Amino acid sequence: MRARYARTYRTAVLICGNPADAEEAVQDAFLRAWRFRDALPDDSRRDAWLYRVLVNACYSKLRQEVPRRERERVRISVDADLRDAQLTDAGEQPDRAAERALTADALAATLHDLPDGLRVVVILRYYAGLSEREIAIAIRRRPGTVKSRLHEARRRLAADARLAGYRPDTEVTAP
Amino acid sequence: MSDLIDEAVLEDLIARIAEDVPVPARGAEYAVDNIVNTITPGRADRARVVASVLAVAAVLAGIALAVPMLAGSSSSKSASTAAPAPAPAPNGGTAPGGGRSGPDPSLPVDGAKIVKTGTLDLQVPHATLRLAVNRVSGVAVGLGGYISDSKTNFGSDATAQITIRVPVAKFENAITQLDALPDVKVLGESENGNDVTNQYADLKAQLAAATSERDALLVVLSRAQSIGDILSVRDRVTTSQAEVNQLQGRINLLDRQATFSSLAVTLSERTASGAPVVHGRSGLAKAWWDARHGFTSVVEWLLARSGAALIIVLFALALLFGIRYLYPIVRRGLV
């Protein structure tokens, strides 16, 4: 559990967009996984099952929140002091660290502008590393639905001006 | 230019976002603590578990009690169609002598000793006497009783006299089940409830007195000095001991009679002319009829011999099925 916690927590933050909700969702997910551990499949579907529990917990948190338009999306607003400390510790130059912070915020904003259904499949596919079939199990949809959602998400992200010209080894500028 | 964002780009984007997400230092520990606190039931949780177990046990006990009661109530209705039911005595009290004016067996009387007997005259279809005898035996055994006597004549005038003994509390059930046997016509029926409570009490008192007398004589015998006294007292001790044995035997007999009621069942076959149902069939139809009745008789036999155990087993199987197949489905639906 401890080994999985960091990745699970980060996945929840990416889905919920809110560290507090994410932490509660992870707690709920681990608790449910423990309660129903006898129902855990033994094969590769185990990860999909665990992410399914997590996604459901995140959805519960999202449903509990105020309406979307009133919801304050933290956009993974990492504490500036903490991040500066981390970057400084790593020996990075302050101006470079600031640029990275702006880039991260821009990317997070782009990601969180996606609808929940699209964002979840993108996160599960490109961060959690699940296959389309495992994502289908996790979100209880058909693999074809997962494929179409991934396609739609990639299309929307490609059309987002904030990511124009971005490459893995380059940076984008904040809008 | 592709209208989709490159997968490698997307993966890198999300990885960079995730990297900037600080993970709570003690998040995993909190999760573990949360689980530990949940799986360690407190006193209230244990009380709820005990209450649940007691509730389930109460339900099962209620089912176990309700089934024989329902069977008993239905049996009274069936018996009343064949013969009038005995008139219940007020408060289930004592009734002098026997006859159908005895106390209602369905009314429990604390400490009362009721000796129940009955006769049942049944007519069965032609060539089904052996099957009927087996069914009567099955009813007796199924109710926890036994066959005390059985005489069967498979000659031209096929008849059978069977005396079954069943627990007194299931006497009415026995009559009802026998009345309800398939293809059976009730020609006659009688029940006799004899309250022997007073007689039983008298015997107990006599036994106590006889025992005291014998014990006193034994003391005298132990103190006798002369041969003549010894012989004289010894004769009286022997007589007193015989009286004690006789009284004890009568008490034991009443105990047995009050524990197991006796029901004499007479089975007789209808004449061949009176059974066109069987003989009027063609070979295939007769085979089908035999197979059908053979199957039902086997099922009846199993039900009679299993009693409540079969119901419990079926309930347990249903419960296991639910736990094994339905509960995981429901559980997965919850998460």
Image (tube, rainbow, N blue to C red):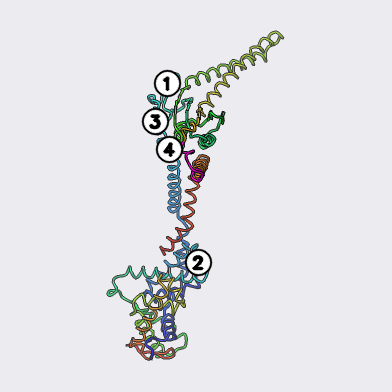
At horizontal 47% and vertical 20% (from top left) the residue drawn is B198
Q: x, y percentage for residue B116? A: 48, 26
Give amino acid for label 1: Ala
Q: Are marks 2 and 4 on the same chain?
A: no
Observer-side mark, 4 or 1, equals: 4
The span shown in magenta is B276-287
Residue B71 badge = 4
Dot placed on the residue nearer the N-terminal end, 3 or 1: 3
Residue B95 badge = 1
- Chain on which label 2 sits: A
Farthest residue, direction top:
B228
Q: x, y percentage for residue A128? A: 45, 77
Q: Which residue corresponds to mark 3?
A: B80
- Chain on which label 4 sits: B
- Chain on which label 3 sits: B
Number of numbered callouts drawn = 4
Would you call the spot at circle 2 few (<14 residues within 10 Å), some (14-19), or many (20 or more)?
Answer: few
Q: Are marks 4 and 1 on the same chain?
A: yes
